[in-house]
Amino acid sequence: MLLDLVKQTRSYRRFDQRFEISRDTLRELVNLARLGASAANLQPLRYLLSYTPERNAAIFPHLAWAAYLKDWPGPAEGERPSAYIVILGDTGLTRNFWCDHGIAAQNVLLGATERGLGGCIIGAINKGGLREALNIPPRYEILLVIALGKPAEKVVLETVGPDGDVKYWRDSDGVHHVPKRSLDEIILE
């Protein structure tokens, strides 16, 4: 059921780094992105795939992880993603990518979840460093990075408390808690 798939599609930040994700799996996930909606049907997104330890290691230091977890610098060696998809915008086609990359990223995560994988959409990127590390031509704007792997953490949804705090947090057992506003709170009638 779609509702269950959406509930299971969380932002995972710790993975079993030993689990390999193949190029073919990444291509299948990008195909889901490709089939999604695109403003004016321009289809300006391009995708850079990373699934080798060497290329993954070149990407990792250019990403920021979990801003609300102040004392956590990101996944340790052994908990890092097994693959990445870098979403790029082709400025030769347009300079406005609207929300295409958000639609594409969600399609990728839904497909990853369906395959027993997890991921995290990352927008906090050192774009200059990543561009240099991956030799990305200037024509392509770096929009998002999707980290992918076999989840090595539990993420649970809970209702936002009376204080209204939406910050995610981890408990002493390492369970990642994600407060969500109620449906009645977000619908204006």
Image (tube, rainbow, N blue to C red):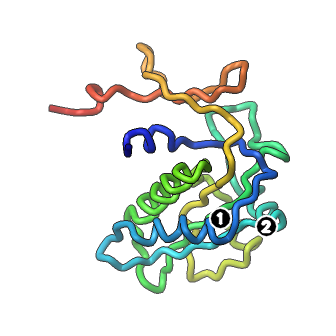
In the structure shown, which secondary structural element does the residue marked by tag 2 occupy? loop
The residue located at (42%, 21%) in the rendering is 164
User: Is residue 123 placed above or below 47 in the rendered structure?
Assistant: above
Residue furthest to the bottom in view is 92
Q: What residue type is labelled 2?
A: Thr
Please tell me how many numbered marks the rendered image carries: 2
Q: Mark 2 points at which residue?
A: 52
Q: Which amino acid does label 1 sit on?
A: Lys
The residue located at (70%, 32%) in the rendering is 70
Residue 151 is labelled as none
In the rendered structure, which disc, 1 or 2, sits on the residue that comes first in sequence? 2
Task: Say left or right for 120 vs 35.
Answer: right
Circle 1 Cα neighbour tier, 10 Å, few/some/many (<14 / 14–19 / ≥20) = some
Residue 79, quarter of the rendered image: top right
The C terminus appears in which quarter of the rendering? top left
Q: Mark 1 points at which residue?
A: 127
